[in-house]
Amino acid sequence: MSRLDQKLELAFAPLATAVQTGRIPGGVLGIVDNAGNRVMRSLGAAQLVPQHREMTDNTWFDLASLTKVIFTTQRILALADAGRIDLDAPLISALPDFRQYNPDNWERRVTFRQCLGHQTPFPAVFPLYTYGRDPQLLRAFLLQHQWEAGPAVYSDINFMLLGLALERIERQGIRQMDPGPGFAWSADPAQSAATEDDSWRHRVLVGEVHDDNCSALEGAGHAGLFGTADAVLDFARDRLADTGPDAPIRTPLSARRTHGWERPYEGWSGGELCSPASIGHTGFTGTGLWIDFERGCAWTLLTNRVHPTRHFDSGIVALRRAVGDLINSD
């Protein structure tokens, strides 16, 4: 048995327990190293209601906030590398109409880098979808709403705005942009992990985005990406291969964050045994990706923990940490 196989055997145990005890319907765990070797295993159900389907290694997942790091962060940093934007310039360099009726407002001073690092005063959450289903009207609302300033917290609004900036710069909607190899903006329901029996859309969501704000906007920078565990591991392998120590995704912006990503802190999702040279991110639907550059290893845990409802203690926080610690236990 190879070293990666041994890691998978150890780390798969808490996922198996979570499925067997009914905490989550199912999941896929995959590990890749910097030589490109990978192992993967799936368990449980891709869907429970209104029909039952088995989880497979090739199941497509709504990656939720992994969109922020796999798509939006990569796009923004590529624009910066190409000299098309300045990360320390305010968003109004791409969105000149942002809060245009009050040129002295704090929102007009927010920069690309601050949004990438969640260092802005925007609120943590905002139910934009409750203001209607017209995507262009909601974009205008997002740009002109008077946001109440608060402490810097993790906020989807940062990446909604980065998504709007991308759309202006590229002159096309998010869903018209190439999401990258192996990824898509929707998926075949017959091959997808179901998410929630949604109270707003009145159906079980399968192959369409779970995030209500992203759905209403018909594409956004904070959510909406779909992919398989293989696609996520391909992305991670590429980062292991081509990301040096000075790369922005490894450069700290605060005690907990780099550009787009989280870095290790006490209680973080990757567990306690990751090296300091690690980054990671999670998604609300039950997804996650962690990359340890010192160990030359990355892993993804993809689950459908919100199926059929988010209003249940799935134990996903403890599960992620347990998996990470077992992968990094040697």
Image (cartoon, grey):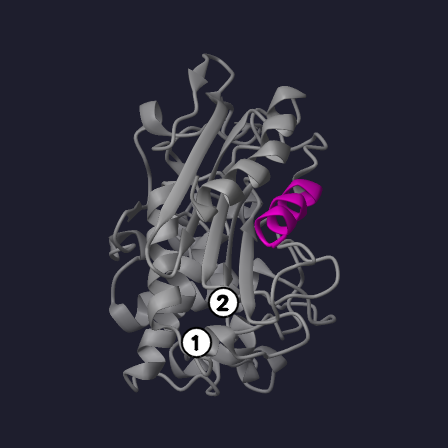
Q: In this view, does 107 lie to the left or right of 3?
A: right
Q: Nearer the viewer, residue 250 or 297?
A: 297
Give the amino acid type for the residue marked by disc 1 in the picture. Answer: Asp
Q: Which of 16 and 62 is in front in this view?
A: 16
Picture coordinates of residue 169 (x, y %)? 30, 73
Q: Residue 191 has which mark?
A: none
User: Which portion, as a residue range, is magenta?
Assistant: 317-330
Q: In which quarter of the image is the C terminus?
A: bottom right
Give the amino acid type for the residue marked by disc 2 in the picture. Answer: Leu
Q: Please report contact status of discs 2 and 1: CB closer than 8 Å, yes or no.
A: yes
Secondary structure beneath label 1: loop
Secondary structure beneath label 2: helix
The residue pinned by badge 1 equals 97
19 shown above or below 137: above
Q: Residue 143 has which mark?
A: 2
> Does the image show residue 48?
yes
Q: Residue at x 46, y 58 (%)?
A: 297
Q: Residue at x 56, y 84 (%)?
A: 109
> Does the image show residue 98?
no
Q: Residues within 10 Å of mark 1 (few under 14, many from 20)?
A: some
Q: Residue at x 38, y 55 (%)?
A: 136
User: What main secondary structure does the magenta stretch of the protein show?
Assistant: helix
Q: Residues within 10 Å of mark 2 (few under 14, many from 20)?
A: some
Q: Is residue 175 left or right of residue 305?
A: left
Q: Nearer the viewer, residue 208 or 44?
A: 44
Is residue 24 one of those drawn in magenta?
A: no
